[in-house]
Image: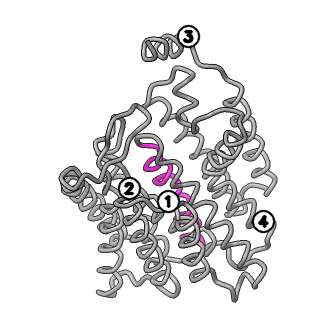
Amino acid sequence: MLYGIAAATTALLLATVLTALLRTAALRLGVLDRRWQHRKVPLLGGAAVVLATCLVAVVGDRTGVAPLGSGVGELLVAGALLAGLGLFADVRRVKARALVAGTAVAAACVVPYAETGVAGGLLAVCWIVLVTVGFRALDHADGLAGAVGVVTAFGVGACAAAEVMDGLAVLLSVLAAALTGFLMHNWPPARVGLGSCGSLFAGFVLASAAVETRAGYGLGSSAAVLFALTALIAAEVLLAALTRRGTGTGHLAHRLRRLGLTPQGAIVVLGAGAFCGVLVGVLVHLGWLAESGALWVAAGALIVVLALLRAKPSAQVRARLRVRNG
């Protein structure tokens, strides 16, 4: 317990400092991203999250103070390699299919097939890829991926602690702390972005850790818990799929902004939504809530997505758009 607190504190401070340093490097190297407001944001904040998480976790494991345990080290290595692919995508353009393929390969290397079986393992790989890609999509708005990542990491960490997976629980607490340190620079208006490097790493670690905590449980109950833990990410993926079919444009935060919410307000609303789903997932995992609770989460997510698709911009937003368009 004491080491977990010390590790989380170290990761928070380290990520805060590294994010500031790498922000300067990104500006000098021209590693920039363009936000929805058409302003350029330096990337490499995700690299700070990856470095802080890996350094603290590896030091704890090598010193024997907090061994990662079987499978967790492999998960961290796979996540770091995927982060390297994401970093390459931040610096140079990489097709989305390459990122999906890389995520699938990494997922296939960490799924515990001995407990899930081959069929269950393949489903787990698909789910990890979906969550990882969906989490990357959350980086469309300042503060969103960081906030959702922190909430989800604490939830999955609670599930890992309940299964006495101490190494995995410590890793997730370190990740949550590193994302918090990054969030200090990424809160709207963001001074640095997470990028593909950080978003792929965080999404992959969260999804893979969740699968690990549910290995050995029934397929139905596991699906309920895993969905609830990542319901907001599922909503983002669903909205993106529907908008590509011509029903509208934008992501979750963009839609809320069109309704008149401030950037900070949109993140608070979505963060609260993520917390509700994660809370249900943890309670179902602990057996304190029936599996049907996940159905209520699914229904709520579907209602929100459909409502956002049908919602029209507020009068204030329409006026601002008219001014912008001349």
* Residue at x 69% of width, y 72% of height: 124
Tell me, yes or no, whether the highlighted magenta stretch contains residue 176: no
Label count reads 4
Q: CA distance from mark 2 to mark 1?
A: 9 Å
Work out whether mark 3 precedes mark 1 in sequence or the reverse, and give the earlier one.
Answer: 1
Q: CA distance from mark 3 to mark 1?
A: 38 Å
Q: Position of residue 26 (x, y in %)?
A: 24, 54
**Looking at the rendered structure, which numbered label has been put on residue 153?**
1
Q: Amino acid at mark 1?
A: Ala
* Residue at x 50% of width, y 68% of height: 205
Tell me, yes or no, whether the highlighted magenta stretch contains residue 149: yes
Q: Which residue is mark 3?
A: 315
Q: CA distance from mark 4 to mark 1?
A: 20 Å
Scheme by which the image is coloured: one colour
Q: CA distance from mark 2 to mark 3?
A: 35 Å
Most foreground residue, 204 or 153 = 204
Residue 196 falls in image quadrant:
bottom left
Quarter containing the N terminus? bottom left
Work out whether mark 2 precedes mark 1 in sequence or the reverse, and give the earlier one.
Answer: 1
Q: CA distance from mark 2 to mark 4?
A: 29 Å
Q: Tag 1's secondary structure?
A: helix
Q: Position of residue 116 (x, y in %)?
A: 73, 81
* Residue at x 55% of width, y 24% of height: 258
**Looking at the rendered structure, which numbered label has been put on residue 179?**
2
Residue numbers of the magenta segment: 143-164
Q: Which residue is mark 4?
A: 221
Assess whether mark 1 and mark 4 are in contact (beta carbons under 8 angstroms).
no
Q: Tag 4's secondary structure?
A: helix
